[in-house]
Image (cartoon, grey):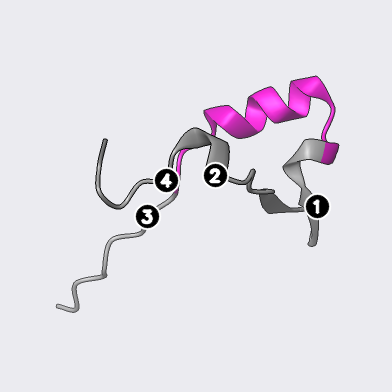
């Protein structure tokens, strides 16, 4: 076990919120299909522009 990791019995669940249609909602409130879609999302990372 990693020195910085708590045993499972001491861990607490974390509620994940996301922005949907301009407002924030907990992912746990989504229907099963929307939860599945949320798990498949990939983070977007924009590259810095090059000025030329």
The magenta span reads 29-43
Residue behind mark 4: 6
Q: Is residue 1 left or right of residue 23?
A: left
Specify the label residue 25 is tagged with.
Answer: 1
The earlier-in-sequence mark between 4 and 1 is 4
Circles 3 and 4, Cβ within 8 Å, touching? The answer is no
Quadrant in the picture for residue 36: top right
Could you classify mark 3 by the number of other residues whose Cα lies within 10 Å: few (under 14), some (14-19), or many (20 or more)? few
Q: x%, y% of residue 10?
A: 54, 44
Instruction: Give the camera-side residue of 9 and 48.
Output: 9
Q: Is residue 45 left or right of residue 50?
A: right
Is residue 25 part of the magenta span, yes or no? Answer: no
Does dot 4 land on a helix, a strand or a loop? loop
Q: x%, y% of residue 6?
A: 42, 45
Between disc 2 and disc 1, the foreground one is 2
Q: Residue at x 14, y 78 (%)?
A: 52
Circles 4 and 1, Cβ within 8 Å, touching? The answer is no
Real-space Cα distance between discs 3 and 4? 31 Å
The earlier-in-sequence mark between 2 and 1 is 2
Determine whether 23 is above or below 11 in the image: below
Q: Main secondary structure of the magenta part?
A: helix
Instruction: Give the camera-side residue of 32 and 47.
Output: 32
Q: Residue at x 46, y 38 (%)?
A: 42
Between disc 3 and disc 1, the foreground one is 1
The earlier-in-sequence mark between 2 and 3 is 2
Residue behind mark 3: 45
Residue behind mark 2: 10
Specify the label residue 13 is tagged with.
Answer: none
Could you classify mark 2 by the number of other residues whose Cα lies within 10 Å: few (under 14), some (14-19), or many (20 or more)? few
Real-space Cα distance between discs 4 and 2? 6 Å
């Amino acid at each position: 076990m990693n020195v910085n990791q708590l045993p499972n019995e001491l861990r607490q669940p974390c509620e994940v919120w996301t922005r949907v249609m301009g407002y924030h909602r907990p992912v746990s409130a989504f229907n099963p299909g929307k939860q599945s879609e949320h798990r498949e999302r990939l983070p977007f990372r924009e590259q810095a522009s090059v000025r030329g």
